[in-house]
Amino acid sequence: MIKRSHVRQFLAVIDAGSFTQAAARLRVTQPTLSIGIAELERLTGAQLIVRDRRHLRLTEAGGRFLPIARSLEQSFREADSFGKNDRSEWPALKLGAIKTVPALALQEMIRTISQHYSIEMIEGTDSELRSHLSDGRINMMIGLLKGGDKSNETIELIDEPYTMVTSHGHRFSRRQAVEPEELASEVMIARRSCEILDETSRFFTKHQVRPRFALRSENDSRCLQMVAAGLGITNAPRSLIIEGTVALDVVGYNFRRKVGLRLGEFWRSEAVECVREAAEAFRNRV
């Protein structure tokens, strides 16, 4: 008989992309996880996952089983919560947000939504939050909007360029734009939470720019504050620029991002007015 533990293990492996990370999330050993997946494959009568040293992928059978597993897990969650929530209680909303959302704009959104719902916030990468949304673990998320996203499931919040950022006192602060090669001698700060970290690295490598780094951090606020202090320069979406810093365009550095709300089914229908009001509050603060 397939158990919930089998389903959770299977989904954890798929969502994490590796047995090692999935085992860490589930707080089990990797051998225990491998045994659980093997048991599931025996019970289903088919190999579900193929893995080698560096990658894993779903087999055809695994692809067919994935939506079944997600549906089972959602049903388990609904069964767990059945009868626990008093309809008269203040309704709750689980909101996921990527780390690079501008904090003051997010503050305005939360202020608006909290007039109607209690809120639990979850941080994660865009891919992690998309998985949580499809599983029903969150009700909506603020993340990147991509070409394949359905318009009836999203509300656009920001469409903006990435730019380099310097302090007000930097030698380039009064320049409208610089050539990439002019940054070769600059000290930089690496925003590890940046969604285009790899693309930025390839861009500068192409132009023979291999800077030294004064700081590598996932904390955007700290990175931008250190730019303002003159520690180095960094790249960032324009909405993250703070007082004491200046946007600096680099010729050929033409990356953009769209950030928006992706909504679960209930929130597309029952709470749409509240959500749209919150989205407008967000835009007004960017």
Image (spheres, rainbow, N blue to C red):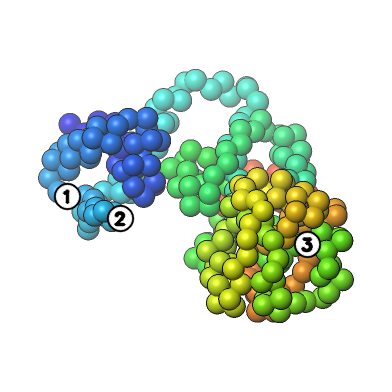
Q: Quadrant of residue 109?
A: top right
Tell me residue 37's x, y (percent): 22, 40
Tell me the residue at 85%/55% (across/down).
244
Left or right? Give the position of 17 relative to 280.
Answer: left
Tell me the residue at 54%/44% (across/down).
124
Circle 1 packing at 10 Å, graded few (<14), some (14-19), many (20+), is some
Between the residue at mark 1 and the residue at mark 2, the CA separation in whole angstroms equals: 19 Å
For mark 1, give the secondary structure: loop
Q: Nearer the viewer, mark 3 or mark 1?
A: 3
Q: Is residue 75 above or below residue 193?
A: above
- Specify which label sits upstream in the sequence, 1 or 2: 1
Tell me residue 137's x, y (percent): 48, 38
Q: Is residue 163 above or below residue 56?
A: below
Could you say which is closer to the camera, residue 23 or residue 78? 23
Q: Which residue is mark 1?
A: 47
Q: Which residue is mark 2?
A: 54
Q: Which residue is mark 3?
A: 166
Between the residue at mark 3 and the residue at mark 1, the CA separation in whole angstroms equals: 53 Å
Q: Which mark is residue 247?
A: none
